[in-house]
Every structure is written in C-alpha cells, then in structure tokens.
C-alpha cells in the first residue's frame, strides 16, 4: 500500500485493475486526485493481457481479448500512451465449396480485387454493389456515433437526430438485423459474413426481437469511426502495460493481490474493505469506481443483483510451425489468415447452429472465425520462432452458450474443440494438427477457453465478455449523464457493463473519470 498506509481519506478507490479501471485511474491521477486501484490478481489487465501460455515457448499471446476497434485515439493522446495498432490489408476470407469446387470470398486487398472476388463467387456484381451500399451506410453512421462514446450520453432522439438518416436508424436501431440482411443480400455466404459481426459473444438469432444482435453489430461497425479492427502491436498486454504505466506515473497506486470484498457508502463517503494474504483492511474514499461486472458490484454493495449473464463463445489460442495450405489454391494462406477467416458461417449455418444450441445441443457445425496476429505483428514471437516461420492463430467460436458446459466443462470443451477444428480442416489441404507446434514437454501448442473457464479465471459472469447484454449508446432507463452511474451517488460502474461498455475501449473508464471530475473538479 505504500503511500496510502494510514491515509485518512482517498479521493477515489478503483475496484479492479482491468484496462478500464486503469484508464480511469490515469485520468483522475493526472487531474490531481489521490487514487488507489485494488486488483485481485497478481497482474493488471483483466481480459486485456498478454501471456506465454505454452511451456518453454517464446510466444506472448493476447490470451483473451485480441483485437482493437473501440479504443478512441482521444484516450491514447490524452494519456500519452506509447501504444500503436496496425491495420489489416485483408478484411476477411470465407472458404466454401461451390459446384464441388473449393473457392471462397476474399474481402480486401483493394476495391478491384474485392469486386472480382464477389463476382467470381456469385456470378455477378450485384452482391458487391449491395455490399458497398450497406457498408457505406454503416460507415456514415460510424463517423457520427463513435465520437459520442466519450461524451455525455445523448438521448435516443438526440442520437437519432445526429445520425440524420431515417433508413439507417430503422435498419440498425429498430428492426431485427436479419430483415435488412435478407432484403439487401441474396447469397447465403455473403449474408453470413455480414451477420457474424452481430454475434461476437452474443447468443442471438438474426431475427431476435430483443435486437441484442443489432446492438452487437452496431458496436462492431462504429469502432474508430470506420469499423476497422486493428492488431495491437506487441499484443493486448502492451496496451494494458502502457495504461498502467501512465496511471502510476501520474501518482496512482496500483495494488495487485488486493481483493475488494465489500463497499459501504452513504452516498457521500465510502469505505472499501479489501483482503490480502495478511488479512482484511478498510480504506475510506470519497468515490468508488467498480471495474467489474454489475453482478460483482451488487455483491460488493449488498444490493439486489441483476439477471444472470451468459457468455456464448469458445476462445482458442494456437501456435503453428507453419500456416496450413488451403484447398482453395487461388488464395495465399498469408492473406487468408491475416484478416478474419470465417468457418461454417454461412447464413443458414449460423441459424442452424443457434437453433441447435438453443435446444441444448452443441452445434453440429460450430461456427468460428480465426486470424493470425503474427502476420501483421511478429513482435509477439521470439526472433528464433519468426526466423523458423512460426505463426499464431486465434480462433473465436460462436453459438456455444455457457449452459452447454454446465454438466461437464472439460468433456464438452474437448468435444467442441475437436468438432470446431474439423470444420476448419474441411477447407485445408493438410490437417491443422500437422502444423501445430509443440511446447517444451512435447504437447501441442493449443489451449481452449469456454465461458465457464472465463468465469472461473476472470470472474466474467457466465463467461460473458461484455458482462451483460450490450446497450444502445443512448440514455437508458435508470442511467445517468455518463452511463456509469449506480444506485449510490458516489459509486460508479467503470467496467464493460456500463452503457457504452464492452470490448477493449477504455470508454467506461474515461466516462467514470469524467463523472467524478464534473462533481469535484
């Protein structure tokens, strides 16, 4: 605890040292506030970390979160972060088979190549023109919505007026995304590629009346004002380390191995009880920011918890001796894997997978998407691995809700991993297993994380990577000016469960800090 031993009252105590809590700490400390961050684990970062998961192998992987879209450059500039991202020249590649022939859709590498790829797959330029119109619309919305994420929450009408496009508003905010996908696109594969951004960590059908798929889609297409998903140079841990460094440099104390167990508040002053290996202690504070889930917030304050959250994804990290060859020989694997490589994500395949999981069974053809970080940023690998041609693969599986793992997490994980990789193998000219590297003990370099693994390791409720269903970025019932407010005036939620939370963004941390500074500049 150092400088805060015996301190009478802190300005701010932040519960949780994930990237959002560290962003809040850096802003508040730079504003002259006394700040203490309490982190349960031995390291900061939460889900935005880099680790060496394979024994004796010099590969530092983004173990959980892995791409960056929603982090505003404003936060990077404000905090002076030494952090960079790199764009990907290929957006996606989706393999398929048509007329008994392996083929696929490569999106990227220039407008002409993309147009030719659509024409080759579908037989005409119509789908590409529809694609251009649709993503032209989302691009215009992104430019108008993304800057609002670090401003006070607009009302629904204010955001609608800012977008100033009634058709776009209807498509994205009012009717199920499946309606516009089916109205605008006719090819099943193209429809599926569009829909996938609505399903990342979100268990929903294209026509779900709750529109949770629309909310997920919106956040995936507005990032940076462009919707581009970039690679963090040095891995996701490079971002967390940079933010933690900025917080400490500004005077914040970041205490790892300190688990907050209780928050007591009368709305004006608060006390946070924390536990270490040496026992429990209490620290007083004017404000408490909780960089954890809404369920954890309720546990700390003794309030009624919200409805349970549920995650629905499989995360797989791999290290390969070489990239596998593809059955579709018209595409270089270095291009195919540098963007998002879609597997079993045709429109009907996604609908079938959802229906099977909804009925309580693992999808027979599990959908997933893959990308290779090291093609864009080889710095995460040791020089010897780079020289030998090693590469990482990151796989993110869809439509695998936590409920499917409840009776046998280990067994179901193994079964799902096997069937997921079989879907990939169907498009490869050689088995992926032949390409896997081995660790110092001779074991294949592959690890898989189910929602229940994430709940255990990171305390994500139900393994939900967003902490709860995402919310549209406007004023919700019960939310305050910044979307971080709680039932207690001096306790704020600065984690992914805040309005405009989810993803690696720092936005909830920024907004919670702004709420504190507005009250006590």
Image (cartoon, rainbow, N blue to C red):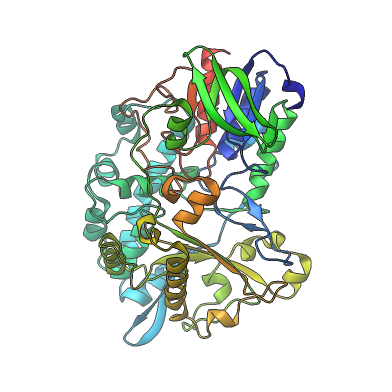
> Residue 405 placed where, x, y %?
40, 60
Q: Is residue 97 above or below residue 111?
A: below
Q: Is residue 70 visible?
A: yes
Relative image position of residue 209 (x, y in whole percent): 21, 47
Q: Quadrant of the C terminus?
A: top right
The residue lying toward the viewer, choosing from 281 and 516, is: 281
Instruction: Look at the image and tell me in which quarter the N terminus lies.
Output: top right
Number of dots carrying numbers: 0
Q: Position of residue 470 (x, y in %)?
A: 38, 42
In this orientation, which residue lies closer to the viewer: 436 or 176? 436
Residue 97 drawn above or below residue 414: below
Q: How far across and down, in percent of the image, does residue 142 sit?
A: 41, 43
Q: Is residue 178 above or below residue 34?
A: below
Viewer can see residue 341: no
Of 105 and 436, the residue lying toward us: 436
Q: Is residue 160 left or right of residue 115?
A: left
Give the residue drawn at x 62%, y 62%. Answer: 376
């Amino acid at each position: 605890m150092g400088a805060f031993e015996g301190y009478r009252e802190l300005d701010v105590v932040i519960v949780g040292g994930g990237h959002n809590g560290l962003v809040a700490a850096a802003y508040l400390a730079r504003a002259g506030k006394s700040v203490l961050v309490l982190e349960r684990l031995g390291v900061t970062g939460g889900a935005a970390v880099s680790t060496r998961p394979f024994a004796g192998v010099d590969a530092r992987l983004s173990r959980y979160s892995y791409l960056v879209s929603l982090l505003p450059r404003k936060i990077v500039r404000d905090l002076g972060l030494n952090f960079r991202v790199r764009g990907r020249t290929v957006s996606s590649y989706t393999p398929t088979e048509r007329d008994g022939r392996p083929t696929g859709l490569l999106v990227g590498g220039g407008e002409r190549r993309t147009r030719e790829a659509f024409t080759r797959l579908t037989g005409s330029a119509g789908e590409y023109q529809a694609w251009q119109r649709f993503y032209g619309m989302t691009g215009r919305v992104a430019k108008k919505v993304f800057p609002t994420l670090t401003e006070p929450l607009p009302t629904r009408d204010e955001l609608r007026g800012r977008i100033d496009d009634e058709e776009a508003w209807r498509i994205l905010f009012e009717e199920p995304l499946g309606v516009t996908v089916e109205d605008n696109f006719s090819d099943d594969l193209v429809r599926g590629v569009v829909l996938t951004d609505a399903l990342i960590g979100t268990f929903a059908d294209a026509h779900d009346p709750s529109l949770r798929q629309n909310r997920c889609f919106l956040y995936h297409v507005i990032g940076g004002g462009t919707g581009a998903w970039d690679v963090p140079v040095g891995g996701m841990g490079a971002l967390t380390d940079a933010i933690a460094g900025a917080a400490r440099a500004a005077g914040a104390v970041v205490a790892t191995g300190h688990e907050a167990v209780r928050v007591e508040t009368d709305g004006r002053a608060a006390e946070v009880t924390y536990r270490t290996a040496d026992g429990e202690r209490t620290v007083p504070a004017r404000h408490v920011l909780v960089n954890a889930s809404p369920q954890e917030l309720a546990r700390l304050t003794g309030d009624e918890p919200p409805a349970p959250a549920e995650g629905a994804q499989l995360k797989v990290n791999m290290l390969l001796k070489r990239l596998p060859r593809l059955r579709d020989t018209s595409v270089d694997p270095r291009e195919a894997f540098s963007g998002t490589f879609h597997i079993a994500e045709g429109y009907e395949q996604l609908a079938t997978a959802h229906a099977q999981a909804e009925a309580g069974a693992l999808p027979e053809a599990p959908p997933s998407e893959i990308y290779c970080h090291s093609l864009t940023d080889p710095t995460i690998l040791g020089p010897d691995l780079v020289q030998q041609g090693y590469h990482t693969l990151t796989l993110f599986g869809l439509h695998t809700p936590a409920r499917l793992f409840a009776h046998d997490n280990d067994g179901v994980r193994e079964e799902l991993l096997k069937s997921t990789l079989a879907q990939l193998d169907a498009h490869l000219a050689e088995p992926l297993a032949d390409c896997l590297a081995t660790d110092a003990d001779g074991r294949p370099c592959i690890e898989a994380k189910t929602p229940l693994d994430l709940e255990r390791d990171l305390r994500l409720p139900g393994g939900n990577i967003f902490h709860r269903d995402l919310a549209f970025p406007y004023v919700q019932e019960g939310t305050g000016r910044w979307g971080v407010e709680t039932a207690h005036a001096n306790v704020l939620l600065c984690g992914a469960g805040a309005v405009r939370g989810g993803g690696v963004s720092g936005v909830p941390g920024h907004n919670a800090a702004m709420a504190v500074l507005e009250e006590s500049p």
